[in-house]
Image (cartoon, rainbow, N blue to C red):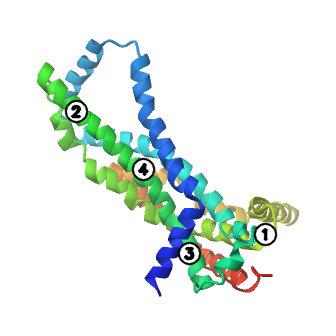
Amino acid sequence: MNILQIKTSIQKEMWEYKKIFLWLPITIAALIILAPIAAYLLSDSANGYWLGRWEQLAEAQNRAMFSKIFYSFVSALFAPFLLVATLVQLYYFIACLFDERRDLSILFWRSLPVSDAMSVGVKLLVGALILPGIFLLAATITLALFLLAGFVLCSVISISHDISLWGLWASSDIISNTLSMWVSLIPYSLWLFPVYAWLMLVSIYANKAPFLWAIVPVVLIILIESFIVQYFNFDSSFFVNALTNYFAIDNEAVKLYVDNKVTVSTIPMSIFADKVSFAGIAVGSVFLYLAYWFRANRSHS
């Protein structure tokens, strides 16, 4: 496997989707940074109110509480990035193979010494890991700017009002709480691998309206199965139950991790890891192979 070919293929994908890979994360970061500044400038709260809150924080030396508070802050900060990244992922996987057939650029790309298997694999890599990784990087940089502002604020408060907030930094588990967001990406991507592969299969198969091709077959299967279950008085629906069990996150599982006093930052990673299954990986692999087969045998026709 040629590393240069993989690198070039990744750069091609980045270039084709530059707006959503580069400018969209920057726009989200700018809005998140400007929002608290605008809120502070428009706020009627006096400086004395904030000083009182800082004093309360300085007196409350609770490491576990500070760690949870900081993780909640990190989660709230990363949430818009991850939400938009998920929507962009769905769009990318639906469009990545469809667009190159629609504009006939696939004829040029297939003339290059890059195999169809590598092309499909690179698109999966870009959509599943690199794309959300870029959004996570933008979120991490935004967090770093907030931490820098917090450092300056702590210095000013410490010097001018003799209020020490430095204990917050040691108690917040900054590195571990931030890394947990990155580490959770691996089990999250494995969990949604069947969805990614299905969308890629639809993208290479559909001649038009790939979004409808992604939704309509699933809806039809659900409707047909529901009719059969009701007509023959079966106990349950296999397909609906399989989808529900695979994608639903059980509140009891979350409660179990909390009751077992698992570190709060590891809960999402643990939940995503529990959702990964051999059946899901197998189904996703079948979809991915079919996407490769259609690209290799029918995309040029």
Which residue is found at the position 27% from the left and 47% from the top?
A: 174
Q: Which residue does the numbered mark 1 point to in the structure image?
A: 206
Question: Which element carries disc 4, helix, strand or loop?
Answer: helix
Report the front residue among 191 and 88.
Answer: 88
Q: Earlier in the sequence, mark 3 or mark 1?
A: 1
Distance (Cα) linking label 2 and label 3: 47 Å
Q: Residue at x 41, y 35 (%)?
A: 33
Task: Identify the amino acid type marked 4.
Answer: Ala
Q: Is residue 298 above or below residue 104?
A: below
Mark 1, secondary structure of its residue = loop
Residue 282 point in image, percent of width and height: 59, 78
| Of the two numbered discs 2 and 3 in the rendering, the one whose residue sits closer to the viewer | 2
> Residue 155 vs residue 79: left or right?
left
Q: Amino acid at mark 3?
A: Ile
Q: Earlier in the sequence, mark 3 or mark 4?
A: 4
Distance CA(mark 1)–CA(mark 4): 33 Å
Spatial CA span between label 3 and label 4 = 29 Å
Calculate the distance from the C-alpha at mark 1 to the C-alpha at mark 2: 54 Å
